[in-house]
Amino acid sequence: MAPKVTSELLRQLRQAMKNSEYVTEPIQAYIIPSGDAHQSEYIAPCDCRRAFVSGFDGSAEPDPQLALEGIAVSCLEVSLGTAIITEEHAAMWTDGRYFLQAAKQMDSNWTLMKMGLKDTPTQEDWLVSVLPEGSRVGVDPLIIPTDYWKKMAKVLRSAGHHLIPVKENLVDKIWTDRPERPCKPLLTLGLDYTGISWKEKVADLRLKMAERNIVWFVVTALDEIAWLFNLRGSDVEHNPVFFSYAIVGLETIMLFIDGERIDAPSVKEHLLLDLGLEAEFRIQVLPYKSILSELKTLCADLAPRDKVWVSDKASYAVSEAIPKDHRCCMPYTPICIAKAVKNSAESEGMRRAHVPKGGVTEISVADKAEEFRRQQADFVDLSFPTISSTGPNGAIIHYAPVPETNRTLSLDEVYLIDSGAQYRDGTTDVTRTMHFGTPTAYEKECFTYVLKGHIAVSAAVFPAGTKEPGYYEDGAFGIRIENVVLVVPVKTKDGRVWWDDLMVVFVKKSKRFCVLLPQYNFNNRGSLTFEPLTLVPIQTKMIDVDSLTDKECDWLNNYHLTCRDVIGKELQKQGRQEALEWLIRETQPVSKQPGTRPVVWQPRAPGLQWQEDTIWGARPIRDRSFASSVVGRRHLGTLKLDTASVSRPSDCGWAAGAHLSGPACERLQLVSGLPALCLLVCPELQALVDRMVPSWVLEINPSLIIEQIITLGPHAIVRSSNFASGKPI
C-alpha cells in the first residue's frame, strides 16, 4: 500500500502558520511532538496529531495493506517521534525500532531523521541549518515538556531564532474529524488493593510539602493522579488512567476532571464528596480545561517566600503559569517516588497478579492468552495489545497480528509472545521466546546471549522497573526476555563493591572482584536487589548451556524452582493438570558439560582493534582509541567504545548486549534499560592493575568518575556511566 498522501495537509498547516487568527506574527517552523498534555507514553486517538499529519502512526492501529508489507503494530500510539514542519521541509525524528515502519508510512514530502545514527542532526541543529535568519519556531505549549522547551529555546536563541508558544494547536485546526477526548467511567480501589487511603496519601504529601515551604503541588501525570486518589480509568486504551489534573495545597485539594463520571455513587462515596469533611480533605471538582486559569489565580495570591512544586516534565504552559520566583521544578515528584515504594498490600497484589488466575496462529494464541486472563479474578483489561509473533514478524518491535499478516506457528521458526493485563491488584507484562521444533545453533546462540544479559541485569541493583534485553534480525526472528521485578533488600558479602557519597569502596577477594551496585550499602545501611515477580519458565531448549557461567546456571535453576513452587501450587489448586505437567517439564534444572568454559571477551593485542580469541569464541569489542589510551595510565579517562558487535559477559557475569550499533553505553541502555555497565577482559592491563590497591580507589570522589573507566582487578575493567554523587541514577 502507498503511504499516506500528505501534500494537502502540509499545505493547510503552512497556511495556518501564517494565519493571524492563530499567530500574532507568521512562524517559519512548527513542532509537532508525539505526546499529550500530560507527557504520557501512551496517548488517546484525539492526541495522535503527529500520526494524523504525517501518516507515521508509530504504534497505532495497523493498516491491513501496510501489514501485508511486513509492518504491523499495536492499536495505540506510543510517544516515539517528533515532526517539524517548515515552509519548505517536513522532517520526522524517530529511533531505530521504527525506521522501517516510518519509511513505509510516510510519503515523499517527508525526510526521515534516524535518531541515534552518527550523521543525523538533532532537531534544534537541523532547524538552525534550514531556517532563514531571525525565524520564529512555534509549538503548542500545552504538549511540550518544560525541559524540552528550555533546551530547544536555548539553542535557537543562540542562533538568533525564537521559540514561540502557539496557544491554538494548529494541527487541531486542520483536523476536521478529530476524535473526542475520552471520558469513561472511573473505578475505585479499596484498601485491600492500595494498603493506604487517599486521605493518608494526601497527608503524607503535605508533610513533604511543609518541610520545603511548598504551598501548592501541581500534579500533571495521569498515573500519579490515579495513584494519589486510588482511582483507575480507561481513557487511554490499555492504561488505567483518566484525563485530569490535580492541585494539592496545605489545606485545599482541587481535581480538574470532566464528565458526569465524578458523580457516580461509588466515586462520590470513595472521594467522600457528599460528606461534611474537614476543609483540608474536601475535594473541589473543577472543569478539566480550567487548570491554567485556576493555577494563575492561585499564584497571584502567593506570599514572597511561597513555593509551588511542579515536575520538570510538566508542559511548558503549566510551568509558565507559575511565576519563576515561586516555581520549584523537580525531575521526580514526591508522588512518583512514593508510588515506586510498594507497601505490603501493593507488593502482595503485584505477586498475585503474576500468578495465573491460567492449526495455531499468531492471532489464535493472542486470543487464547486473553481468554485465559479474562478467567482470572480481578481482571480489568489487557495492559497492552498482545505481541504474538513468529519468524520474521518477531523482528518487528511492536508487532501486533492482523489477518493479513497472521502467520501459522511452525516447528521451524522462533516464536515470541509479549503479553500482560491490568488487574485490580497489579499490572503484568511478560515476554518469552520459544521454539516448538529444533532451534538452530545460531538461534540458540542469539537466545543465550539475550538470556545472559537478562540474568546480568537481574543480578544488578538499580531503581525498580522492567528488564527486557533483546535481539532483532530483520526478516528472520526476534528474541526478547522480559520480567517485572520488585526491588528488595539484599545482604552484601565479602568480595563485593559499593560506594558512598564520599568514597568508592572495593573489597578484594582471592584476586578477583565481584560487582554489586546498591543505592546504599556503606556503614551497614543495606543494599537492594531485584525479586522477579514474573514467574514464567524460560525455554531451556533455546539455551546453549555450555556458554553460561556457573552463576548463570544457578540463577536460571533457582528461578525455575521458584516458578515450579509458586505457579505449580496455583495450577494444582485450579485443577490444571496439563499445565502443571508442562511446568514441571519446562523447569528441569540445567547443567553444563564437564570441562566447558564460559564465553568472555579476550582481546589479545593493544593495537588499533581488538582481535578475536578463537579459544573463547568471543566477538570482541572494536575501538580505535581504547588500547592506546589506557595502557600505562592510572587514570583511564573518558572513552566511547564504538561497536557494532555483541556485548559479552565477563567472568564476573556482568554486561548485557545484542547486535546493535552505536556507543556501548547507548547500546546497553537500549538493551537493558539501565545505566551502561560494561566489563571487558584485558590481559595487557594485568600488570598495571596488579600494582593497584583498593586504597588508590578510596581516594576517588564519585562525582569525578562520571564517564570514567574504573579498574577493578586483573580480570575486568568496568565502564559505568551516569554515576553522580556516589549514587546510581
Image (cartoon, rainbow, N blue to C red):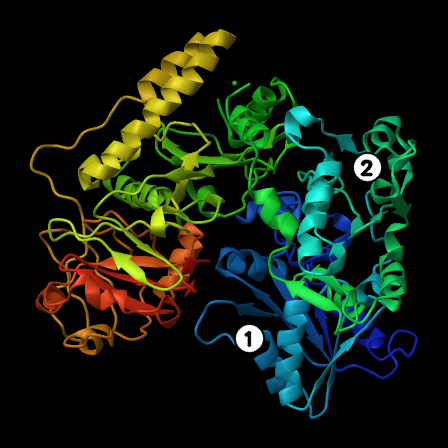
Question: Looking at this rendering, what residue extends furthest in the bottom direction?
Answer: 133
Q: CA distance from mark 2 to mark 1?
A: 39 Å
Give the x, y percent position of residue 367. 59, 26
Residue kind at label 2, given as amino acid type:
Lys
Identify which residue, 557 or 504, lies in the foreground. 504
Counting labels gives 2
| Local crowd size for mark 2, using a 10 Å CA cut-off: few (<14), some (14–19), many (≥20) | some
Rendered residue at 67%/32% (across/down): 196
Inspect this view and state whether residue 314 appears.
no
* Labels 2 and 1: the sequence-earlier one: 1
**Residue 15 locus on image (x, y percent):** 84, 76
Left or right: residue 510 compared with residue 527? left
Q: Secondary structure at mark 2?
A: loop
Label 1, on which residue?
Answer: 122
Q: Is residue 535 above or below residue 465?
A: above
Please tell me which residue is depicted at 84% across the width and 74% down the height of the picture: 16
The residue nearer to you, when weighing 95 against 597, is: 597
Per the image, the residue denoted by label 2 is 184
Q: Nearer the viewer, residue 280 or 50?
A: 280
Give the crowd class for mark 1: few <14, some 14-19, many >=20 residues within 10 Å.
some
Q: Quadrant of residue 357?
A: top right
Report whether 7 appears left or right of 106: right
Direction from residue 313 to residue 487 in the image, left or right: left
* Residue 676 in view: yes
Amino acid at pointer 1 = Thr
